[in-house]
Amino acid sequence: MISRQMLSQITWVAGSYGASQGLRLFTNVVLARLLAPQLFGVMLIVNTLRTGIELLSDVGIGQNIVSNRKGDQPDFYNTAWTIQIIRGIFLFAIALLLAQPLASFYDSDELVEIIPIISVVFLLTGIQAPARFILQKRQAVRTIALFDVFIAAVSAIVHIALALYSPTIWALVAGLIVATSISATASFFLIDFRLYRIKISREHVKAIISFGKWVFASSVVFFLAMNFDRLYFAKEIPFAILGIYGIARTFSDMIGMLVQRIGTMMIFPKVAAFAKDRSELRPAIAGLRRKALLATAGGLSIIVALSDVVILTLYDDRYIAAAFMLPILMAGTWFSILSTMGESFMLGIGKSVHSAQANFAKLLWLVIAVPLTLTYYGLIAALCVIAIADLFRYVSLSFSQWKEGLSFLKQDFALLSLFAFLVVIWRYIFMQLGLVADFGTWLEYGSIING
């Protein structure tokens, strides 16, 4: 039985996520009308590289604050914040040094100018207050939710205004910097800013590094596993197709990100705070997990069945190939959702190494299969390879959960069968109602991809 408090938290998490993603979707659609597809391709590379550089020194500042029993004490979070500031300065310098080599690798003169300017974001995120993580530890879900919606609204206004003023790549670059500046400033008002001090405690540094070494390994592998397709495609396919693929990936990632958000803000802290014997943990969460995944299977199956209609409704003909890409990518989200839940359990019991192993399994599949399929069978086959990549992540995590007595294989197999059945049924019903295209027409949407 779900408690009233938990139901309220889920409502705030899901509601704020829905509002934030709605604003981002609105922004994306408006920008797609104002800007050329190749600009999204360039920005996809920039954002992917920015995330990769950021993970070069990730020691899990947020995870440390949430998981450590002293995480909400000033000495601990001020030490974590100081490490974060130093890291931001380090990443800023790294980005400046890598600008020319990266521009040469991707054969793009624009990147020589864009990357040094974008690197300012590292300084801004470095000084951002750790208030969000403190609130997450205290499970102050409502405050975090309202903050996220505020930032999403500000970002939408800034990006659209800049694109109307200057429909070039610089609207996207400046929009990111301005939105990040506002987010960093606003973070100091979540909790009394007078509590923050530059401080280094040897005891807390040791604890942060000890916990963070596996978070670092997991983060690097996670980044490569999540973004290998973008990095590889950026070198192998035209920027216009890359930009269209980026839009399809944005939609397909939304559901997985919602589950990841619930896992990070609710499952991880609750498992970490579980004071009873480990053997009692699985029975305590099994029923809630089943109910959550049943609801997810029902909702996601409808979304998969209707996903191409979303692209055709919101975007013009320049983006029609995304209507073919999205159902394939969206179907693979199911394994991403299962993996994210498993990851939250493993982090909650302090086993962050399993997350790194799972992401490595996914990365290994992508590194081997994507280049081979793209070379010999084309982009459509590569899309299918990418869609099932999280299956390998899930298998690795399932094995780890089994060793820890937290396996849900029977439950997951039954739910997977239900999900696949529902997708087929919904698609057939929608076809009969004339809401979605038949199979032949859907294949025509993807004709631009390999042709």
Image (tube, rainbow, N blue to C red):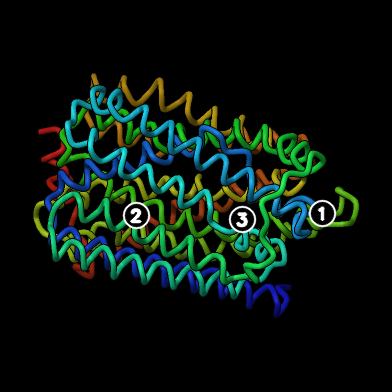
Q: Secondary structure at mark 3?
A: helix
Task: Give the residue type at disc 2.
Answer: Ile
Task: Give the residue type at disc 3.
Answer: Thr
Q: Which residue is mark 1?
A: 69
Figure check: 363 above or below 91: above
The alpha-carbon separation of the residues under discs 2 and 1 comes to: 34 Å
Q: Earlier in the sequence, mark 1 or mark 3?
A: 1
Marks 1/3 in contact by CB < 8 Å: the verdict is no
The alpha-carbon separation of the residues under discs 3 and 2 comes to: 26 Å
Q: Which residue is mark 3?
A: 264
Using residue 362 as the reference point, say whether residue 320 is left or right of it.
left
Image location (x, y in percent) of residue 377: 23, 24
Task: Give the residue type at disc 1.
Answer: Arg
Q: Which residue is mark 2?
A: 177
Image location (x, y in percent) of residue 309: 23, 62
Residue at image position (19%, 60%) is 31
Callout in the foreground (1, 3): 1
Using residue 193 as the reference point, say whether residue 98 is left or right of it.
left
